[in-house]
Image (tube, rainbow, N blue to C red):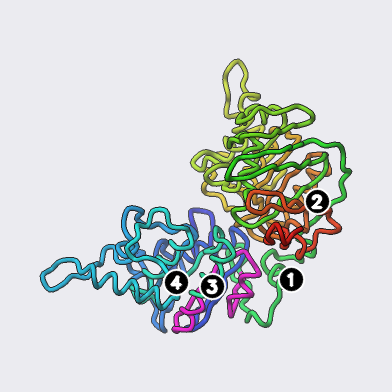
């Protein structure tokens, strides 16, 4: 159990990790998963309950004690020293010394190579860490844990920023660690990964333990029901909407080396899904349309009016809104209040006599916080303290407050739980019913197929396919996203 003042973050965190097994921990944002992990990692002290490690009760007062006991946490975004080499990061603070008391760099490098060989990955131990992919940085964190002989590894949303190939490599590493007899905890919102990798799954809800099942004896439907406390028969609630005239018209948009000759339309009341593999250029096109990134040729029109290049203010004035992929870095000011974040794009309309009052901001923000059911203790709470799903709602609220004609949403449900995903999907459907034109970029194929009236596919900076909802099958979309241009003809 763990409380923060009057707020109970964890009521009954219960999980048993076994040697030679990968155990999934799932639940909605706010279910208590992160609090449980931080207690195990020694970052928080528990208020009640027990932790047993190899049969003996332990009570960690610090992260150092947890690490010394053989527990390692691999986070979604590793924190390595960018100016040091891979080897130096692995052995930071505990470098071996030779007989004359100097750091034994040869021994360090040899051990790093041996660990990478065991994991079946190829990473240069002498390379400077700066510039390495998130996937490689996570492998380095795992190598660090192995060098400390960690017997328990906790992987917290490790695949959120990885490509398909990188995910498969990480899974291969996880399986090799399991086969060595280590115990792994895998936290993820992605059911396909949970069923592909894990042996057992534990579900939490509202800070409490719900159930533990062998993966082979459960199903996605059952896990969803346990997570949200109700049956979610329709994860993609697509509501009927009347499709109107063209609102967003993109013609011949080109940025050499990034995307080429991008042309499409989005009509009032229509949800157009933009699919493709990571790196296909989808986000770059969205940012160029909104005016954040440059483009060399082509045009963008909203409701018949041409938008100037590189001018987000003009885009906003004409009714364009962009919910970016990275909500934490590009969509929110995390140390500002919920109220200020929601009203960030409409502050000029709230001023009277050149003054902007807290009352005016709170009144405007309360409307959208209520409509979107943002779960927060107060409107003046820091946005960074909210769960990922509620942060996404705040970003949506910020842009919906501008009353847009066109809403571009880039990865609208990345990193949020299944219950909140369903809420976001329903919101997008309701907005389309109201006549808003929506361009939705998503790397989750079920989301694209479940929500889009029409699907556009990009590959290597070019549009390679367009499918009406009735013809947008997984096979057709994936072929357009992966096939060579000659094969696609």
Asked whether, in this view, residue 304 is left or right of residue 257, the answer is right
Using the image as rendered, state which of residue 176 and residue 300 is in the foreground.
300
Residue segment shown in magenta: 174-203
Mark identifier at residue 166: none
Using the image as rendered, state which of residue 355 and residue 160 is in the foreground.
160
In the structure shown, which secondary structural element does the residue marked by tag 4 occupy? loop
Q: Residues within 10 Å of mark 3 (few under 14, many from 20)?
A: some
The residue identified by callout 4 is 121
Q: CA distance from mark 4 to mark 1?
A: 35 Å
Q: CA distance from mark 2 to mark 4?
A: 40 Å
The residue identified by callout 2 is 454
Using the image as rendered, state which of residue 430 and residue 262 is in the foreground.
262
User: Which of marks 1 and 3 precedes in the sequence?
Assistant: 3
Q: Find out whether the residues at labels 3 and 4 contact each other: C-beta distance under 8 Å.
A: no
Residue 185 is inside the magenta segment: yes
The residue identified by callout 3 is 171
Q: Residue at x 69, y 63 (%)?
A: 228
Q: Find out whether the residues at labels 2 and 4 contact each other: C-beta distance under 8 Å.
A: no
Q: CA distance from mark 3 to mark 4?
A: 12 Å
Q: Nearer the viewer, mark 3 or mark 4?
A: 4
Mark identifier at residue 221: 1
Q: Residue at x 48, y 62 (%)?
A: 135
User: Which of marks 2 and 1 precedes in the sequence?
Assistant: 1
Q: Find out whether the residues at labels 4 and 1 contact each other: C-beta distance under 8 Å.
A: no
Q: Residue at x 61, y 36 (%)?
A: 295
């Amino acid at each position: 159990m763990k409380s923060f003042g009057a707020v109970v973050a964890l009521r009954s965190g219960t999980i048993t990790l076994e040697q030679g097994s990968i155990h999934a921990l799932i639940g909605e944002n706010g279910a208590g998963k992160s609090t449980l992990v931080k207690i195990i990692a020694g970052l928080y002290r528990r208020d009640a309950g027990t932790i047993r490690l190899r049969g003996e009760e332990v009570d960690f007062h610090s992260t150092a004690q947890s690490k010394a006991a053989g527990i390692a946490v691999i986070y979604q975004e590793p924190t390595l020293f960018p100016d040091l080499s891979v080897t130096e990061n692995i052995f930071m603070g505990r470098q071996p010394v030779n007989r004359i008391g100097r750091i034994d760099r040869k021994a360090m490098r040899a051990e790093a190579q041996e660990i990478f060989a065991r994991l079946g990955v190829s990473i240069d131990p002498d390379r400077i860490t700066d510039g390495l992919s998130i996937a490689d940085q996570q492998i380095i964190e795992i190598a660090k844990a192995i060098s400390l002989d960690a017997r328990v590894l906790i992987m917290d949303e490790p695949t959120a920023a990885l490509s398909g190939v990188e995910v498969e490599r990480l899974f291969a590493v996880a399986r090799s660690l399991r086969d060595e007899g280590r115990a792994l905890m895998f936290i993820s919102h992605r059911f396909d990964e949970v069923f592909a990798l894990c042996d057992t799954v534990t579900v939490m809800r509202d800070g409490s333990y719900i159930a533990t099942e062998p993966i082979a004896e459960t199903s996605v439907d059952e896990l969803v029901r346990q997570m949200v406390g109700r049956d979610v028969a329709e994860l993609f609630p697509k509501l009927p909407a009347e499709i109107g005239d063209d609102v967003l018209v993109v013609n011949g948009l080109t940025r050499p080396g990034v995307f080429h000759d991008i042309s499409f339309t989005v009509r009032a009341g229509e949800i157009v899904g933009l699919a493709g593999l990571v790196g296909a250029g989808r986000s770059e096109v969205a940012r160029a349309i909104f005016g954040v990134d440059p483009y060399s040729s082509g045009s963008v029109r909203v409701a018949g009016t041409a938008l100037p290049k590189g001018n987000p203010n003009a885009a906003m004035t004409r009714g364009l809104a962009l919910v970016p992929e990275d909500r934490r870095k590009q969509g929110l000011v995390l140390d500002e209040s919920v109220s200020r974040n929601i009203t960030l794009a409409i502050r000029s309309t709230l001023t009277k006599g050149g003054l902007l009052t807290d009352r005016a901001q709170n009144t405007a923000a309360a409307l959208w916080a209520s409509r979107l059911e943002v779960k927060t203790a107060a409107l003046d709470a820091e946005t960074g303290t909210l769960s990922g799903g509620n942060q996404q709602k705040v970003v949506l609220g910020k842009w919906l407050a501008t009353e847009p004609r066109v809403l571009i949403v880039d990865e609208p449900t990345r990193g949020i739980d299944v219950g909140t995903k369903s809420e976001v999907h329903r919101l997008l459907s309701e907005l389309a019913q109201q006549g808003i034109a929506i361009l939705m970029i998503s790397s989750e194929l079920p989301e694209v197929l479940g929500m889009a009236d029409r699907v556009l596919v990009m590959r290597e900076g070019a549009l390679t396919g367009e499918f009406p909802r009735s013809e947008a099958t997984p096979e057709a979309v994936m072929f357009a996203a992966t096939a060579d241009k000659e094969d696609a003809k």
